[in-house]
Image (cartoon, rainbow, N blue to C red):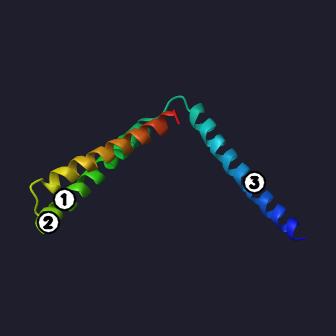
């Protein structure tokens, strides 16, 4: 009897997994069928890329400035975290552009 319950749970998880894969596949097929994307899509993509770079960079600056006040050091925390935030933002932007271009 306990085995039946486990089998039912496993079948439920498998059905959920198949459904999620099917939904994702249908979205990709629909997206690829849209050969021409509107100007609004590209403006949205520019905004997404811009914010994905700007937010981590500004967070790095603010945290670095706070660290410079609290824990002064020979190396500037602000500059270090600015560069780190910029790097993280560029990686995020690259991820989103790659995902939207269909190279996933």
The answer to whether marks 2 and 1 mark residues whose Cβ atoms lie closer than 8 Å is: no
Q: CA distance from mark 3 to mark 1?
A: 47 Å
Whether residue 40 can be seen here: no
Q: CA distance from mark 2 to mark 1?
A: 10 Å
Q: Residue at x 80, y 57 (%)?
A: 11
Could you say whether the residue bearing mark 1 is in a helix, strand or loop? helix
Taking the spot 42% from the left edge, 37% from the top edge, the residue there is 97
> In terms of sequence position, does the residue under pointer 3 or pointer 1 come before the other?
3
Badge 3 or badge 2: first in the primary sequence: 3
Pointer 1 residue: 64
Q: Secondary structure at mark 3?
A: helix
In screen coordinates, is 2 left or right of 82? Answer: right
Q: Using the image as rendered, state which of residue 99 and residue 70 is in the foreground.
A: 70
Which residue is tagged 3?
Answer: 14
User: Residue 80 at x, y = what percent?
Assistant: 19, 51
Residue with the mark numbered 2: 71
Q: Is residue 80 above or below residue 40?
A: below
Q: Is residue 81 visible?
A: yes
| Horizontal side, residue 88 vs residue 69: left or right | right
Residue 86 percent location from the top left of the image:
26, 46
Q: Which quadrant would residue 64 be assigned to in this image? A: bottom left
The CA span between labels 3 and 2 is 52 Å
- Tell me which residue sits at (50%, 29%) in the image: 36
- Residue drawn 29% across the image and 53% down it: 56
Give the side of residue 45 with respect to residue 74, left or right.
right
Q: Work out whether mark 2 precedes mark 1 in sequence or the reverse, and give the earlier one.
A: 1
Q: Residue furthest top?
A: 35
Displayed quadrant of residue 98: top left
Viewer-nearest of discs 3 and 2: 2
Q: How many residues crowd around disc 1 within 10 Å: few (fewer than 14), some, or many (20 or more)?
A: many
Of residue 34 and residue 12, the one placed in the foreground of this image is: 12
Category of crowding for the residue at label 2, using alpha-carbon neighbours closer than 10 angstroms: few (below 14), some (14–19), many (at least 20): few
């Amino acid at each position: 009897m306990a085995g039946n319950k486990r089998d039912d749970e496993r079948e439920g998880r498998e059905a959920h997994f198949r459904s999620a894969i099917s939904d994702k596949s249908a979205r990709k097929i629909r997206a690829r069928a849209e050969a021409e994307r509107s100007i609004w899509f590209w403006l949205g993509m520019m905004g997404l890329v811009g914010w994905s770079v700007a937010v981590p960079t500004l967070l790095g600056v603010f945290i670095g400035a706070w660290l410079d006040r609290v824990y002064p050091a020979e190396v500037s925390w602000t500059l270090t975290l600015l560069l780190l935030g910029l790097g993280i933002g560029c990686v995020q932007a690259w991820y989103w552009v790659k995902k939207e271009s269909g190279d996933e």
